[in-house]
Amino acid sequence: MEFNIGSTKGAFDMKAIIEWAKNLWLNLSGKKKGKNGEILAFGVKKESYLIMLGIFGVLLLTTLIFIGLAFYRNHALNQRLSQLEQLKNYQLNTFKNDELMADLKDELPTNFNEMLELYTTTKTTKERVEAELNFKKSVYSDFLRNFLLPSLNIWKDPYTQQIDLSILGKKYLQKNPYQDISLLSQWSSIIRESGKDIGTNEVVNMQIGEIKEGGNGFFNIPISISFKSNSKRAFLLLVDKLSLTSNINNIGLLNDFTYHLFDTIREEKAEEIKNLIQTYGAKKSDAMDEKTFKNQIIAHYLYNFLESKSDEVNLLIDNALVDKVIKQSIVCGEKESSATCYFRFRDKYRTIPGLAYSIGVESTADKATLLKDFYASIPPLIAIQSFTFDKAKAQGFSLADDGEYLGNVSFNIYGRGISTEESTEISTLLKEACFGSGSSTDLTVQGALDKVNEKMKIIGASTDSSDGKVALLSNLLELKDSLTSQIEEFDRLSPYNQMIKKFEIYRELKNMSLCTQ
């Protein structure tokens, strides 16, 4: 609709204004006549309003019904709240009959509040036990592991993680405990010392096999020993010695005693540990707790102390401390006599005579030295394959004494192999020590052969005809022949033998002045 509130003459048309206001009201109120005479509201037919109003009414009624039902159910649940909290109203047979709940079946909570309390308590206990187990594991991992499962990586210090590239040649033979000579000496000593002060155990014959590296990160060496014992007592002590690291119960007792040893050292030698931390320049990581960190410091010191085989005074272990360890390990009561506590200690560790009947005798004066000797004599982990024995006379040795025993034991000694990461780390350091950092030449048989050929080419182009040149060329030819014969074999070597070969190559190249560093 068009509307002009002013006339062409400039005066207002009152009638037109009234008509305009009326039409505006009709539009806003929705009362406007359509062409067919039907009433419209904001452009919508009256019938549509009624339909929409009906739908709105149904929705409103449905909503009110749902609200009412929800209110009723909530009220009903509140009335039954005490019943709902009772676990007896639920089917929990599967839960109650579970094997893990067998011991607690008669003590289970009766309501949810008690169940929540049980869960909280159980979770706290679980976390505490796990923390304690992890701590005990750290004692084993950081100390006993280096005795029970020694590493083939003799070049890397287990605590400082530093690698000593100077361990080659004669020093390698002296340092490496897996050489036949070292193993012969070690096990002859173990057999001989097992009968000390009681009788004699002698090695009649010993056979040592090759190192076998497994794919699981461990290695084993088969050993067979024929022995002679001059008495039953000496023979039994030998059996005890062999069972020290072949019997899982004895290994558990060994770890248990070491746990109490470290625990007592932390309590009694706090100042000494603090000084060692400064000496080693050790830093505790954020992920490590204080007890585990101090265990590493203790393990580091004791490991070096035992390896040094010196007579220096131990900073962490003295006779008074050993006495406390003994009493703590069997939870000696305040009212128990010292003699009773020592008896209980011997009884607990009786399957480890070297421990129970050395420091476990109260009258023993130098317990600290005896404890050091015990740890120093611990053989690596072994698995006995066969063990045969009988009296010597029964085996046809008519001239043997009546109490003499002859036997044979075959076993595998175990340890940790060289990991891929360790092999890569040492190989990189050897390469850099010989050729410098950034060199593309690998310290392998082929890499060494390339260096030899390169040197021979340079010498061949030289006009020098001195005896020194001839001698050098002769040595290079000899080295070339040796390396050429090893190329195919090198790739088939185990990680440990490859590492030994790389150190040999490094030594040979240095001797021939083929290393650039």
Image: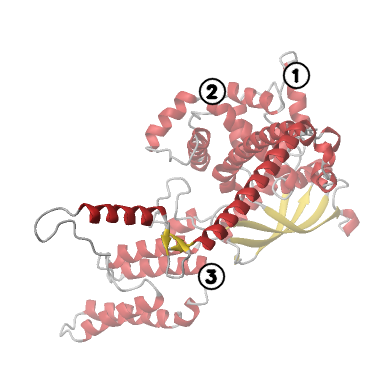
Q: Residue furthest right?
A: 394
**Residue 353 visible in the picture:** yes
Q: Nearer the viewer, mark 2 or mark 3?
A: 2
| Tally of marks | 3
Left of 382 or right of it: where is 169? left
The residue to which callout 3 is attached is 494
Q: CA distance from mark 2 to mark 3?
A: 46 Å
Disc 3 crowd, CA 10 A, few/some/many (<14, 14-19, 20+): some
| Sequence-earlier tag: 1 or 2 | 2
Q: Position of residue 475 (x, y in %)?
A: 33, 77
Disc 1 crowd, CA 10 A, few/some/many (<14, 14-19, 20+): few
* Numbered label attached to residue 268: 2
Left of 338 or right of it: where is 482? left
Q: Amino acid at mark 1?
A: Ala
Is residue 140 depicted above or below 164 in this figure? above
The residue to which callout 1 is attached is 339
Q: Residue shown at 53%/28% (left/top)?
A: 266
Q: Amino acid at mark 2?
A: Glu
Q: Quadrant of residue 470?
A: bottom left
Which residue is more in the foreground, 59 or 480? 59
Which residue is more in the foreground, 110 or 406? 110
